[in-house]
Amino acid sequence: MNINEAYDYIDLMVDKADQPYFTNPEKDIFLNLSITEFLSSKYALMGANQDFSEQYGNRYDLNHTSGYVQAGNYVELVDYHHITYAALNGRSCRIVSDDKLSELRAGENPFSSINDFHPVCSVVQGSSGVRIFFHGNQDANKDWNQGDEFNIRYLRHLDISNWDRIPEQYQYDVLNTTVRKLLANIESTSYGVQAHEAQQ
């Protein structure tokens, strides 16, 4: 189903409820809300596993040749939802928060040290997305550089611009949620009662 067919489906469902027409930009707002709600609910149930990413079409892979390398030894992702895998120079990374990274650098536990054989990937909120840093040494001045190779697999946020990536069987779930949200925002006593009953 393409996005125009999705709009037609919404029109049909709203018309059956005998409610006013919505413009496509209005539908887009509610579609984006419904996609986020749908993915978040499924993610909460299944976690960031391969089944989730394959079923919902939001898994992406990138590496040092993908053009994502930024100045300051980080990769910035604007559509990030969750990292499922990271590697530096062919070695799997532990994925940690920035606070955990500081704890690892300050600690003296040899079993949790950061080195070339046990690299770490940390995630920090940036100005326009999340910044993913790679660390191959406890010394902050000897972190990942442009000569190192990295791989990242992550789940990304989807919106209507990615509508075709969502499998059709799940598009209907998103559309039904969208129709529910649209109708719930109409000032209609009769629909308000129906919506309240549906939630019980």
Image (spheres, rainbow, N blue to C red):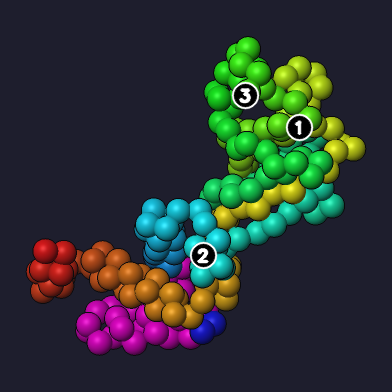
Question: How far separated are the C-alphas under marks 3 and 2?
Answer: 30 Å
Percent coordinates x, y for residue 127 in the rendering: 62, 36
160 or 109: nearer the viewer? 109
The quadrant holding residue 106 is top right
Does 12 lie within the magenta span? Answer: yes
Q: Is residue 54 above or below residue 20?
A: above
Dot in front, 3 or 2: 3
Q: Is residue 71 above or below residue 180?
A: above
Question: How far separated are the C-alphas under marks 1 and 3?
Answer: 11 Å
Residue that carries the numbered disc 1 in the rendered image = 117
Percent coordinates x, y for residue 148 in the rendering: 85, 38
Q: Which mark is residue 77?
A: none
Q: Residue furthest front?
A: 111
Secondary element at image label 3: helix
Does 35 lie within the magenta span? Answer: no
Residue at 65%, 53% (x, y): give it: 153
Amino acid type, residue under disc 3 in the picture: Ser
Please state, as top left, top right, bottom left or bottom right, where the C terminus lies in the image.
Answer: bottom left
Q: Main secondary structure of the magenta part?
A: helix
Residue at 61%, 20% (x, y): give it: 104
Q: Is residue 15 above or below residue 70?
A: below
70 or 54: nearer the viewer? 54
Magenta residues, start to end: 3-29
